[in-house]
Image (spheres, helix red, strand yellow):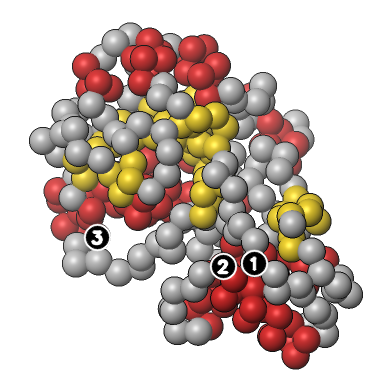
Amino acid sequence: MWESAPAPPGLTGGNRGRETAPTATGECSNNLCTYIASSPLAFDSITRLLGGTSMEYNVYISAIALLSPLVYGCKVNPEPAEAMDSSHVLLPEPRYESTTSVEEALKGRRSIRDFSEEPLGIEEVSQLLWAGQGVTSEDGKRTVPSAGATYTIELYIIALNVEGFSKGIYHYNPSEHSLIRIKEGDFREELLGATRNQPRFEKVPVSIIIAGNFERHKKKFGGVPEDLVKTWVYTEAGHASQSMYLQSESLGLGMVLMGGFDESKLNSLLELPSNETSLYLIPLGRKP
């Protein structure tokens, strides 16, 4: 049922070379129509168009089948299909309002090093990832600043106790607000090994990793000194981590930034591309 078609400009996947988008089979005059038929972004857009109504996928496809000829002049096969396989997790839409002011979050923000054994919900993980790298404008701008809008950091999570998706290691795709699973399984022992058996990782339900890609600045700003490139990337990682700190405080959760880990072991556990490296490790959970 699923094929692969190029995503329209501005709707590509994450930055790990995934430049295609899923598309449902059917007759269409261009790739945009087929992309709209099954894109997670389109799903969110149609849901908002219908006033936030929750839809099953077959209802969604039926709506597209009716709307596409009117709007795009194309036909889409309305046959029900799986919207996502288990390796692609579409995250809930982030919330843009809360009862906690920015000032209150700043005042209350603390590093929390101990966590309860309670699981986190997929909505909470979604909100934290959006705070760290979420897309906030039609031209791709994000929640945190980046030199030249290069966006040199990537977010990964090690999910060990999250309600809503299986244990494993995932990469955050900001443009779709989704997670791409790298590998499935319980990697707590490997995480403990990469962090020199620090006790906080015995209970933590989720760890977020901020990875940096130093090559993007070099490609965009040729000839920039190496030390300046590093400054830009590390500064961007700091922006993202503070955004997540404030978001975790707003949600009543706890987190702490860590740099004391075995970089080689963590990079290997995450299966990072050769042009990325781990910068921050952030255990995240409920306060005890």
Measured as percent of width and height from the top left, residue 90 is found at 51, 54
* Quarter of the view holding residue 75: bottom right
* Foreground disc of the pair 1, 2: 1
Asked if the residue under mark 1 is in contact with the one under mark 3, i.e. CB atoms within 8 Å, the reply is no
Task: Name the residue located 42 percent from the left edge and 48 percent from the top edge.
Answer: 129
Closer to the N terminus: mark 3 or mark 2?
A: 2
Measured as percent of width and height from the top left, residue 28 is found at 85, 73
Residue receiving disc 3? 102
Q: Secondary structure at mark 1?
A: loop
Type of amino acid at the residue the image marks with label 2: Tyr
Task: Name the residue located 16 percent from the left edge and 34 percent from the top edge.
Answer: 116
User: Label 3: how many residues lie within 10 Å, few (<14), some (14-19) or many (20+)?
Assistant: some
Gap in angstroms between the C-alphas marked 1 and 2: 7 Å
Above or below, comparing residue 19 to residue 44 in the picture: above
Left or right, residue 208 beside residue 108: right
Type of amino acid at the residue the image marks with label 1: Pro
Left or right, residue 78 beside residue 47: right
Image quadrant in which the N terminus is located:
bottom right
Asked if the residue under mark 2 is in contact with the one under mark 1, i.e. CB atoms within 8 Å, the reply is yes
On residue 57, the disc is 2
